[in-house]
Amino acid sequence: MSERKVLNKYYPPDFDPSKIPKLKLPKDRQYVVRLMAPFNMRCKTCGEYIYKGKKFNARKETVQNELYMGLPIFRFYIKCTRCLAEITFKTDPENTDYAMEHGATRNFQAEKLIEEEEKKIQREREEEELNNPMKVLENRTRDSKMEMEVLENLQELKELNQRQAQVDFESMLEEYKELEKRQKEKEQEEDERETKEMLDRALVKRLRDSDSDSDSDSDQEETNRKEQQNKNAALKPTDILTTKEGADIKGSSTGVKRQKVESWERSVGGLGGKSALGSLVVRKKPAATTATVQQPTAVGQTASSKTAETSATATAGSSQPVVVQNGSSLSLLGAYSDSDDSNSD
């Protein structure tokens, strides 16, 4: 078996390459190539936009009887992506571009149209100057005048740039920053001053309020102390046991003492009034002959009690507390009880 990968092929000694038959292919034959759209275009049939760079499977052929400096020109056939209409364009080696030929219109070619118009004007001008010497002089005069205007405009621009170049933008920015900083400091100082004034006003007001409160409290305490001294000077500790008016003067602050007095009066009886002790007093009868030794004593005690009652009535009328002169109320009660025993005997 022969080798599958051979490097040298065998040529017989009588090999003649001219005798090999050649294929005769047509010159306008077409090839299928893969390309991208060279420019933006719009289909004339359906109005579909085909953007630059879109890929197509195109057919390529050589344009017959059309060369540019010995370079062949190729034509490409593509189909619209929407309506499948055929679109053709070809190469333009003169302008290093592509030229639309059939089936679509090229978009965004304003710059190209302007360049073509300028070239056309230049060509016409050259043709006129070739046959008319006066036209050449006019064109030269116009060109020189235009050049002078351009130079003047350029000089003005240079002066303007120099004027702007003299301005130091860094110093301007520094001055603006410094001004802004001073303004902020001033605002901060004003805020601090206003805050301090508000605090001072609040402190003065608080001190005034505290002084007025302390003065009113001291005045109230002094008044209460004087009233208490007057009450203590007018009343005695034993007045609550001898008069009912003394208990009423105390008011609600002496409710407990008043309750004690009331309970005492319910159990024993009132000791400061004449009507309360009138039932306990027994008058001595003049016809009594069976008086004992204790009767004079009882009579003396009765007289002393009447004297005390008279003095109590007098002091009550003069709006002063009742004062018992001869002994305590319990001693008087004991004397009254002794008189009752003597009378019963």
Image: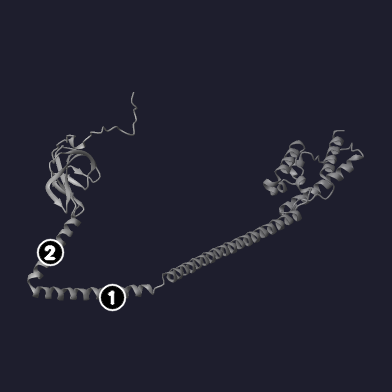
Horizontal relation, residue 60 to residue 165: left or right = left
| Label 2 environment density (alpha carbons within 10 Å; few <14, some 14–19, many ≥20) | few
Q: Is residue 275 above or below residue 178?
A: above
Image height check: is 290 above or below 210?
above
Q: Nearer the viewer, residue 214 or 185?
A: 185
| Location of residue 326 in the rendering, given as x and y in whole percent from the top left corner | 84, 49
Q: Is residue 185 left or right of residue 74?
A: right
In this figure, which residue is indicated by the disc labeled 2? 123
Q: Residue at x 51, y 67 (%)?
A: 185
Task: Tell me: 195 left or right of 165.
Answer: right
Element at label 1: helix
Q: Is residue 285 visible?
A: no
Residue located beneath label 1 in the image? 155
- As drawn, the label of residue 61 is none
Viewer-proximal residue among 35 and 171 = 35
Secondary-structure class at tag 2: helix
Residue type (three-letter) at the residue carrying disc 1: Gln
Which is nearer the N-term, disc 2 or disc 1? 2
Picture colour scheme: one colour
Looking at this view, is 310 or 112 the one in front? Answer: 112
Residue at 34% x, 31% y: name it: 6
Q: Quadrant of the C terminus?
A: top right
Give the distance between the C-alpha atoms of the residues marked 2 and 1, in whole angstroms.
Answer: 32 Å
Q: Amino acid at mark 2?
A: Arg
Q: How far across and down, in percent of the image, does residue 156 sit?
A: 28, 75
Determine whether, in the image, residue 342 is placed left or right of residue 181: right
Q: Quadrant of residue 200?
A: bottom right
